[in-house]
Image (spheres, helix red, strand yellow):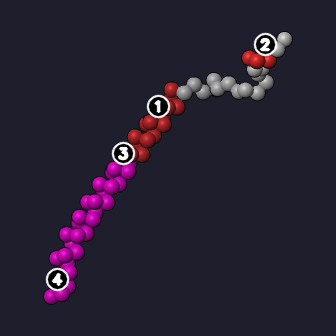
Amino acid sequence: MLDDARKSVNEPREAFRQRYLEAERKRQEELAAAEAKATETVEAKSPKGKKGSAKGKKSPSAKKKK
């Protein structure tokens, strides 16, 4: 009798839990996909190898001193 009562409570609870976990997993996958797409978009927009370095460059004020 007590086992039947526990079963009648636990089965719907476990079913709800499984639906929630599945929905959460899908949400996480969608979030990861959106983040990957955003990262891909940013990488596509930024020019690779175009970043200049300050090393070896003369400052504009150095030209004025002469």
| Spot occupied by residue 17 in the image (x, y as percentages of width and height) | 27, 65
Residue 28 magenta-drawn?
Answer: yes
Q: Secondary structure at mark 2?
A: helix
Q: Residues at badges 3 and 2 in contact (C-beta under 8 Å)?
A: no
Q: Secondary structure at mark 1?
A: helix
Type of amino acid under label 2: Lys
Lateral position of residue 47 relative to residue 27, left or right: right
Type of amino acid under label 4: Asp
| Spot occupied by residue 44 in the image (x, y as percentages of width and height) | 51, 28
Which one is nearer the viewer's eye here, 52 or 13?
Answer: 52
As drawn, the label of residue 64 is 2
Location of the N terminus by quadrant is bottom left
Give the vertical position of 64 relative to 27 (above or below): above
Residues drawn in magenta: 1-30
Type of amino acid under label 3: Glu
Residue at mark 3: 30
Alpha carbon of mark 4 to alpha carbon of mark 2: how far?
92 Å
Q: Secondary structure at mark 3?
A: helix
Judge the density around disc 3: few (<14), some (14-19), many (≥20) Cα neighbours within 10 Å.
Answer: few
